[in-house]
């Protein structure tokens, strides 16, 4: 009887939000998914500015990057996710957890340029998209240089 | 000299959009990334409707799902990507390439509910979010049942 009550309480606890915490490998997988999907969309914008420009495709790609950038991915850098494997071994550098101020600044710069990218894409101005793509790429690289380990 | 010209033409060709085609394993990885990131955001909305409701988090999650849903992921189902491994072995069923009409209908239903999810999230009405989350989940499941192989 006692074990039944314990099991029921456990079931209740698991269903409650406090226990809705992600496992480290899930959190790593989800953040790798976010970056992976943004990478595709960066490639698409680049292909459009280098080749034939398709306004609609650029808008779709820019909107996806913007929404992912603003989704609050910081929540996926849980304690215990500095090492481990999601889709692949994480390349998150320890500085993510130790250099908060620098990270916040880098994240903020990326979000700003991602929001601007979506605005510029909506205009359909290929030259402006090319220029903004350069600015956005620079914020990606800036963060990777400091916070992502090389292959 | 001749080989130099050939190499130059090759470099030019590789830089042109016609050659910007993704490799099958890249396309599979990118689509798995899109679904993976949507899965996280679905989990977040569910945690909010089951537990303490945070309007801002639900909006962020719904916007990410909406932008990914509208990003044109169909382009990632290139010929030759019916088999193969991205982050993991693809679970795309052959029906994706043979039952176009059914697929278009399923994709359209998903997009419609994802767009509606973002609208409902913006209202901050927890009960309406819960109801719309059910409708959106049903379109995910509908497509998985027909077009995604089981584990």
Image (tube, coloured by chain):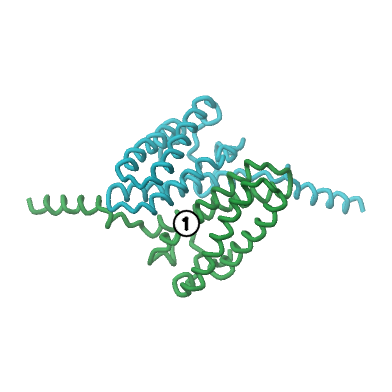
Chain colours: A green, B cyan
B129 sits left or right of A11 in the view: right
Work out whether residue B94 or residue A143 is closer to the camera in this orientation and state it: A143
Question: Does any portion of residue A55 appear in the rendered image?
Answer: yes
Q: Is residue B22 above or below residue A143?
A: above
Q: Is residue A150 above or below residue B28?
A: below
| Residue B80 pos. (x, y %) | 61, 37
At x 33% / y 40%, what residue is drawn?
Answer: B128
Work out whether residue B25 or residue B46 is closer to the camera in this orientation and state it: B46
At x 67% / y 59%, what residue is drawn?
Answer: A134
At x 52% / y 24%, what residue is drawn?
Answer: B101
Question: Does any portion of residue B95 appear in the rendered image?
Answer: no
Q: Is residue A122 above or below residue B105?
A: below
Q: Secondary structure at mark 1?
A: helix
A130 sits left or right of B68 in the view: right
Residue highlighted by disc 1: A31
Report the number of discs.
Answer: 1
State the quadrant of the C terminus of chain A: bottom right
Work out whether residue A107 or residue A35 is closer to the camera in this orientation and state it: A107
Q: Quadrant of residue A146?
A: bottom right
| Residue B79 pos. (x, y %) | 62, 35
At x 50% / y 37%, what residue is drawn?
Answer: B92
Would you call the spot at circle 1 few (<14 residues within 10 Å), some (14-19), or many (20 or more)? many
Instruction: Tell me the chain of label 1.
Output: A
Q: Quadrant of residue A97?
A: bottom left
| Residue B42 pos. (x, y %) | 39, 46
Work out whether residue B147 or residue B63 is closer to the camera in this orientation and state it: B63
């Amino acid at each position: 009887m006692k074990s039944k009550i314990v099991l029921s309480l456990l079931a209740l606890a698991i269903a409650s939000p406090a226990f809705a915490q992600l496992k480290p490998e899930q959190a790593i997988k989800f953040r790798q998914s976010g970056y992976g999907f943004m990478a595709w969309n960066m490639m698409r914008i680049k292909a459009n500015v280098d080749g034939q420009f398709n306004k609609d495709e650029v808008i779709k790609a820019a909107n996806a990057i913007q929404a992912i950038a603003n989704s609050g991915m910081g929540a996926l850098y849980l304690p215990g996710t500095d090492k481990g494997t999601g889709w692949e071994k994480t390349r998150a550098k320890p500085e993510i957890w130790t250099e908060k101020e620098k990270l916040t600044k880098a994240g903020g710069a990326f979000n700003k340029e991602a929001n601007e990218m979506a605005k510029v894409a909506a205009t359909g101005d290929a030259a402006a998209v090319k220029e903004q793509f350069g600015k956005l790429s620079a914020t990606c690289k800036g963060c990777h240089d400091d916070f992502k380990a090389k292959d």
